[in-house]
Amino acid sequence: MSTTNICNHIAIIMDGNGRWAKKRGMPRTFGHKKGAENVVKITRSMKESGVKYLTLYAFSTENWQRSKDEVDALMQLLNEYLDKELKEIMENNVRIVFIGERYMLSDDIQKKMHFLEAESAKNSDLTLCIALSYGSRQEILSAVKNIARKVQNNQISIEDISQDTFSDELYTKDIPDPDILIRTSGEQRISNYLLWQIAYTELFFTDTLWPDFGKDELLDIIKKFTSRERRYGKN
């Protein structure tokens, strides 16, 4: 047990874009745009802080149930982000990966996601993992089915199944579990996000709406994390 923790991976539920816009008498889509701009700022801050992995909850499987107009606007915003961020990603030596149900996205968006992943694959300063069309229950269910198929095909035995083999079937296979989970906007829910991966993650909830969440608050959370005692159930 250590009271000087090293923060390697931060996961964020970026909540509050719509409320940020509403407070200013603007459409929700404007809030999403400001939220996307903040992704770039926070990613830079993470890199400067020495964090090696950043996982952002950008769009959940449940978000598909929002109004068609809002979903269309979010997909357009995503398209624009994927088009213009390659230069920033490469200049800052950031590797980008996407997790989630890709088949639910348009072919055009899927191609751009694949291109960004391939182009940035060798970058090593920071891994930016974007959870897009993502739901943790679906991820876990998919892992269970994959393991069941392997048992059925005699590739592994039931006795071979462990926490490690299960983790290897998740979308986050090559990404360490988060040290910190931050949710902005004052809500205190996990919302079907990284349910397996956050078993021993330190949770931080802030009333700050995502577009207003900045470097100072991020550094304050990291500072608090370093002084927490992480027992991992040992006492």
Image (spheres, rainbow, N blue to C red):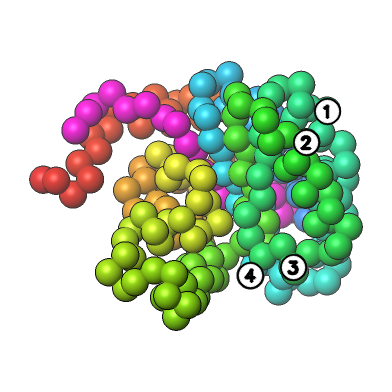
Q: CB atoms at circles 4 and 3 under 8 Å apart?
A: no
Q: On residue 208, which mark appears?
A: none
Closest to the camera, between mark 4 and mark 3, is 3
**For residue 62, which numbered disc appears in the image?**
4
Q: Secondary structure at mark 4?
A: helix
Q: Amino acid at mark 4?
A: Glu
Q: Is residue 125 above or below residue 102?
A: above
Q: Earlier in the sequence, mark 4 or mark 1?
A: 4
| Foreground: disc 1 or disc 2 | 2
Q: Amino acid at mark 1?
A: Lys
Specify start and end residues of the magenta stretch as a single range: 1-24
Q: Nearer the viewer, residue 28 or 157?
A: 157
**Residue 119 disc label:** 2
10 Å neighbourhood of mark 2: few (<14), some, or many (≥20)?
A: some
How far apart are labels 1 and 2 at the CA level? 10 Å
Q: Which residue is mark 3?
A: 103
Q: Secondary structure at mark 3?
A: helix
Residue 21 in the image: x percent, y percent? Answer: 75, 49
Quarter of the image for residue 214 reads: top right
Q: Tell me the tag on residue 87.
A: 1
Residue plotted at (84% across, 53% down): 111
Q: Secondary structure at mark 2?
A: helix
